[in-house]
Image: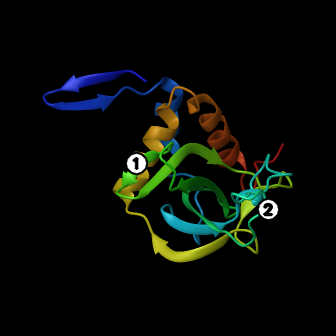
Amino acid sequence: MSRKRKGKKILPVFSQSAKNYLDTRDHNVSNKIKRGQTVMTRDNYFYGSKDYDKLDKSGKPIAGNYRPAVVADTNELDEMGLIKQTRSEGGKAIKKGSNFKPFIEIRDNEGKPIKQGKKFILTSKRVSSKVIDSMMTDSITDKKTASENLKRLRRLKNRKKNPPPK
């Protein structure tokens, strides 16, 4: 990600595909689920974690651990794009003691779109719009994950309730 200096602030420079996403993110959104809402889930409910088990120091699986995730974006079908939060030092900082990984997830462990239900439980906690905007900026401008995240967001936004007639 390249940056430009403006006075003392350093501003990110977005790629054209990131600018296109930012211009259209207010279209095709859910009426029920808002950006910044927190979701509780487990790591093994995300796509690609079919055989994933968290292990303790003795090598036994840990049962019952939930991870918070933040709703980054939605579509008309109430499908969500989530950003996982983490306590590890490898994530990007949100605030003291809370970090996130700049990956946007749109599918569950069965390959289906992420929806509210038994696996993904909406909570009453919310993240401020300023923080979610910062998380999204980091996710779509990160060197390693930007192109994949933008593809996932496009896939999420292109699913609509009433597709146009052919």
Q: Amino acid at mark 1?
A: Ala
- In the displayed structure image, the side of residue 32 where residue 129 appears, left or right: left
Task: Say few, some or many: other residues with alpha carbon within 10 Å of mark 1 (under 14 / 14 to 19 / 20 or more).
Answer: some
**Residue in the foreground of this view, choosing between 109 and 92:** 92
Q: Which label belongs to residue 55? A: none
Residue drawn at x 43%, y 57% as measured from the top left: 98
Q: Is residue 126 left or right of residue 166?
A: left
Can residue 151 be seen from the camera position used here? Answer: yes
Determine whether, in the image, residue 22 is placed left or right of residue 60. left
The residue labelled by disc 1 is 93
Residue 120 image-quadrant placement: bottom right
* Quadrant of the image occupied by residue 95: bottom left
Asked which secondary structure carries label 2, the reply is: loop
Point 76% across, 48% down: residue: 164
Q: Quadrant of the N terminus?
A: top left
Q: Position of residue 165 (x, y in %)?
A: 81, 48
Residue shown at 45% from the left, 39% from the top? 138
Residue receiving disc 2: 60
Percent coordinates x, y for residue 13 in the rendering: 37, 26
Tell which of 166 and 2 is nearer to you.
2
**Gap in Å between the C-alphas at discs 2 and 1?**
30 Å
Assess disc 2: are there few (<14), some (14-19) or many (≥20) residues with their C-alpha within 10 Å of its C-alpha.
Answer: few
Q: Residue at x 40, y 48 (%)?
A: 93
Residue 8, quarter of picture? top left
**Percent coordinates x, y for residue 44 in the rendering:** 77, 58
Secondary structure, mark 1, is strand
Q: In this picture, is 115 found above or below 103?
A: below
